[in-house]
C-alpha cells in the first residue's frame, strides 16, 4: 500500500465516506482492509488464520475484501464478540477501480454510506473517529492463496472534522497559530481548549467562535489542545467534537551552570572557560550577538574585568530552544 485518501461527502439524499487506496499492485491480488470503528482493539475481529498462520487484526468491526482484478467488493461486519453479523447488509457500499496512475488498475475507491449500519457516528464511542488499521493481501486471486503481507495502516478518519496544524514552540515564544477545521459535516457552534487531551470539564474552556478557523493566544505557556464543536448534519440535536490540534510548549530551557567569578593574576596562564549544559554557545554580550561553540580563553595581559556569557540549547519535540545566558566575570 502506497497512499490512502479519505473524504466525507454530503448530498441531499445521503452522507458518505469516500475512501481511496493506492495499493501499488493491480494484477490478480485480493486485499482485505480491516476497519476499527469503536477504537477498541479487544472487540470485533481480533485475528484471522490463513495457511495455518494466525494474523492479529486488533479489533475490526468492518472488513472490506476487494478483488482488484475483478472490481469485486465484499463487505463484512463483525459483532463485538468477533462473529459475523448475520443481519448486516452492505447495500450502498460500492467500489471502483480508479486511475491514480493511468493504466495500472491499482487505485481503488470505496464509497461507504455513513449510517447506523456501517459507521454510526451518532452513537460512536470514539466521537466519530474510525481507523483503517490493517490490511492483508493475497496473491493468485484467492484468499486460499498464501498471504503476501499483513501491514499496519493506522490511518485515522475523523468524520467530525480535524483541526490542524499541530505546532511546537519554545517556552516564551509567540504561540499565535491560525487553526483550521476541515472535513466536518455540519456547522461550528463553538471552539474549546484544554490542557488535557481528554477535555475534562475542569480544564475545558469554551471559546465563542462559529467559524472554521481560530487564532490561538500568543502567550501559551503549557501544551494546549484545541477542537471545534459541530452541530452535525448527521445527527439531529447532537453536537460532535472534532479531532483536536495540539500546540506543544517545550519546557523552559534553564541557564547553564557556571562558576560566576574567575580571578587571575596579571599575565597568568588562563584556561578555557567551562560551563555545564547542552550544546553550549558563548557570547561577549548579554543580549543579541552571535554565539560561538568554542569556549573562550580569557586574556590576562591587561588588568580589569571582562564578562563572558554562555547559554545552552535543548532540543525537544523536533525544535531547538535556546535558554538564558549565564554570566562569568573574569578579573
Image (cartoon, helix red, strand yellow):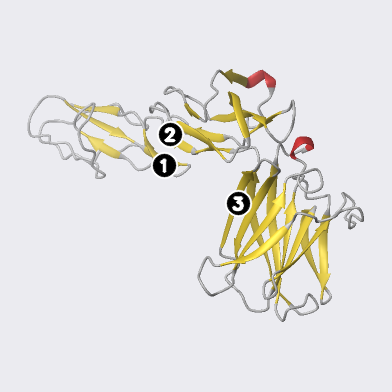
Identify which residue is drawn at 57% across, 70% down: 24
Q: What residue is pinned by disc 3? A: 6
User: Cβ–Cβ below 8 Å for labels 2 and 1?
Assistant: yes
- In front here: 208 or 105? 105
Q: Is residue 154 left or right of residue 319?
A: right
How many labels sit on residues? 3
Q: What residue is pinned by disc 2? A: 169
Residue 319's label in the rendered image is: 1
Whole-number angstrom distance, CA of label 2 to CA of label 1: 8 Å
Image position, residue 260 (x, y; %): 30, 26
Whole-number angstrom distance, CA of label 1 to CA of label 3: 30 Å
- Foreground: disc 2 or disc 3: 3
Mark 2 surroundings within 10 Å by alpha-carbon count, few (fewer than 14), some (14 through 19), many (20 or more): many
Image position, residue 327 (x, y; %): 27, 27
Looking at the picture, does residue 265 appear above or below residue 128?
above
Identify which residue is drawn at 51% across, 38% down: 164
Q: Is residue 12 left or right of residue 315?
A: right
Q: Secondary structure at mark 2?
A: strand
Q: Secondary structure at mark 3?
A: strand
Lower position in the chain sequence, tag 1 or tag 3: 3
Image position, residue 32 (x, y; %): 73, 65
- In front here: 90 or 312? 90
Whole-number angstrom distance, CA of label 2 to CA of label 3: 30 Å
Looking at the picture, does residue 15 appear above or below residue 173?
below
- In front here: 247 or 165? 165
Q: Secondary structure at mark 1?
A: strand
Question: Residue pushed farthest front?
Answer: 12
Residue 28's label in the rendered image is: none
Looking at the picture, does residue 253 appear above or below residue 44?
above
Amino acid at each position: 500500500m502506497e497512499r490512502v485518501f479519505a473524504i466525507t461527502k454530503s448530498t441531499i439524499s445521503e452522507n458518505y465516506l469516500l475512501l481511496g487506496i493506492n495499493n501499488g499492485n493491480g494484477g490478480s491480488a485480493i486485499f482485505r482492509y480491516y476497519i476499527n470503528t469503536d477504537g477498541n482493539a479487544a472487540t470485533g475481529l481480533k485475528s484471522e488464520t490463513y495457511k495455518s498462520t494466525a494474523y492479529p487484526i486488533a479489533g475490526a468491526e468492518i472488513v472490506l475484501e476487494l478483488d482488484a482484478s475483478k472490481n469485486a467488493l465484499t463487505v463484512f461486519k463483525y459483532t463485538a464478540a468477533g462473529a459475523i453479523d448475520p443481519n448486516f447488509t452492505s447495500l450502498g457500499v460500492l467500489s471502483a477501480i480508479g486511475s491514480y496512475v493511468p493504466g495500472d488498475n491499482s487505485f481503488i475507491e470505496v464509497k461507504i454510506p455513513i449510517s447506523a449500519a456501517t459507521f454510526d457516528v451518532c452513537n460512536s464511542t470514539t466521537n466519530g473517529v474510525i481507523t483503517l488499521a490493517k490490511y492483508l493481501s493475497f496473491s493468485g486471486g484467492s484468499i486460499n492463496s498464501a498471504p503476501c503481507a499483513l501491514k499496519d495502516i493506522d490511518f485515522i478518519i475523523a468524520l467530525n472534522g480535524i483541526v490542524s496544524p499541530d505546532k511546537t514552540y519554545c517556552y516564551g515564544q509567540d504561540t499565535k497559530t491560525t487553526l483550521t477545521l476541515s472535513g466536518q459535516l455540519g456547522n461550528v457552534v463553538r471552539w474549546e481548549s484544554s490542557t488535557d487531551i481528554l477535555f475534562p470539564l475542569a480544564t475545558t474552556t469554551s471559546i465563542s467562535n462559529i467559524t472554521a478557523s481560530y487564532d490561538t493566544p500568543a502567550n501559551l505557556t503549557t501544551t494546549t489542545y484545541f477542537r471545534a464543536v459541530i452541530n452535525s448534519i448527521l445527527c439531529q440535536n447532537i453536537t460532535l467534537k472534532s479531532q483536536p490540534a495540539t500546540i506543544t510548549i517545550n519546557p523552559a530551557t534553564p541557564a547553564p551552570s557556571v562558576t560566576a567569578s574567575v580571578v587571575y593574576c596579571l599575565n597568568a596562564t588562563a584556561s578555557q572557560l567551562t560551563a555545564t549544559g547542552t550544546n553550549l554557545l558563548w557570547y561577549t554580550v548579554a543580549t543579541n550577538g552571535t554565539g560561538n561553540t568554542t569556549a573562550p580563553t580569557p586574556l590576562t595581559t591587561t588588568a580589569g574585568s571582562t564578562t563572558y556569557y554562555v547559554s545552552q540549547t535543548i532540543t525537544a519535540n523536533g525544535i531547538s530552544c535556546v535558554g538564558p545566558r549565564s554570566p562569568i566575570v573574569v578579573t
